[in-house]
Amino acid sequence: MLIRVKNLGKDYGSGETLTTVLRGLDFEIEAGEFVSIMGPSGSGKSTLMHILGLLDNPTQGQYFLEGKNVTHLDDDSLAKLRNKEIGFVFQSFNLLPRTTVLDNVKLPLIYSDEKIDHDKRAKEVLASVGLSHRLHYYTNQISGGEKQRVAITRALVNYPSVIFADEPTGNLDSKSGTQIMAILQKLNDEGNTIILVTHETYTAEHAKRIIKIKDGEIISDEKIAHRRRAHDGELLK
């Protein structure tokens, strides 16, 4: 089992200012799944992603990643585990400005213990999303769709156990958004675990399973019999 959470909860503040964001969540995610975590603004879905992505800690319950209880690890241990096992794709791309596409993708490798040729690995992964012709472009010289493909490549470069995508099409036009979903589906078809956070039903339906959250609680958890397929169109041209 890749991910297992038991009675997971998250509070902010204390006393009269206490706000409960997540309430006693229980679920499992197997390696190779494509899961959408869906809910309206304020539902707790982003907080859940931050906890699963080791960016935040729960205030109750337990979180197991690949069988290891990671609930109370110290910051250094979390950082090492996060760099090795987890890739992130954010709505706002989070790329370094005035830095080339290649250097952005190489960044996670700097903190890796793996002894590899950084340039070679980054170029290989960039080629897989059709960006070999953009290696030496600065990130302010490429389109929004290309920026998100760079972000996906950066998430992939350490070959993580799971990729978290937080509203990955939110800042894109419909064509670019479709291309990004096609890449995520292709990665899942190749065996990668994808966890997508979104408030949009259309986007969520590209996954194989949808966990719906409202007011910090899971209200449904269903597998999709016929998921929506994205088409990459002009992606690799």
Image: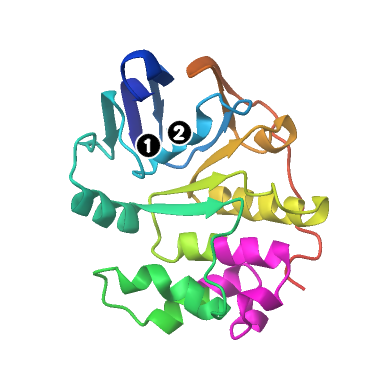
- Pinpoint residue 119: horizontal percent, then vertical percent: 44, 83
State whether residue 125 is above or below residue 28: below
x 66%, y 26%: residue = 225
Q: Residue 34: which quarter of the image?
A: top right
Kind of residue at badge 1: Ile
Identify the image quadrant of the N terminus: top left
Amino acid type, callout 2: Thr
Give me the residue at 81% from left, 50% from top: 174
Q: Is residue 18 visible?
A: no
- Label 2: which residue? 47
Query: Residue 51 shows which numbered tag?
Result: 1
Q: Quarter holding the C terminus?
A: bottom right
Q: Are marks 2 and 1 in contact (CB under 8 Å)?
A: yes
Point 27% across, 33% down: residue = 64
Q: What is the CA distance from the residue labelled 2 to the residue labelled 1?
A: 6 Å
**Relative to residue 36, is residue 159 drawn left or right?**
left
Specify start and end residues of the magenta stretch as a single range: 125-151
Q: Position of residue 199 (x, y in %)?
A: 65, 32
